[in-house]
């Protein structure tokens, strides 16, 4: 029997859409690719990252809307 992952190896739940990776503590998946992230969310892609209070979007369409205290950092790449 192989050992399970260590607690330090555990990662936050995430969704990757074509442009961004979204990480949070909870995703609520709905039909047709729709999802809601009701809590704090971090997002990243090559050259930028940011945070928001919550988000919603659709994985099939590759869309996401960010709400509340949205902060985006762009390093110019």
Image: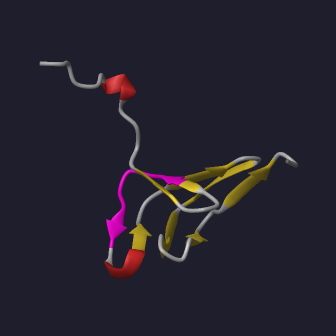
Closest to the observer: 1 or 75?
1
Is 26 rendered above or below residue 29?
Answer: above
- Is 27 positioned to the left or the right of 65 in the image? left
- Residue sticking out furthest to the right: 76
- The residue drawn where x is 59% and y is 69% is 66
- The residue drawn where x is 54% and y is 77% is 61
Closest to the observer: 63 or 56?
63
- The residue drawn where x is 65% and y is 62% is 70
Does the magenta portion include 24? yes
- Is 15 positioned to the left or the right of 50 in the image? left
Q: Residue 75 appears at what percent x and percent y?
A: 83, 45
- Residue sticking out furthest to the left: 1
Q: Residue 43 appears at what percent x and percent y?
A: 59, 53
Q: Which residues are magenta?
A: 22-29
Q: Residue 68 appears at what percent x and percent y?
A: 59, 68
- The residue drawn where x is 30% and y is 22% is 6
Does the magenta portion include 54? no
């Amino acid at each position: 029997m192989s050992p399970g992952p260590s607690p330090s190896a555990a990662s936050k739940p995430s969704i990757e859409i074509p442009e961004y990776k979204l990480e949070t503590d909870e995703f609520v998946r709905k039909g047709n690719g729709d999802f809601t992230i009701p809590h704090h969310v971090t997002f990243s892609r090559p050259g930028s990252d940011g945070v928001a209070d919550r988000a919603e979007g659709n994985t099939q369409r590759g869309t996401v809307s960010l709400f509340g205290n949205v902060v985006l950092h762009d390093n110019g790449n």
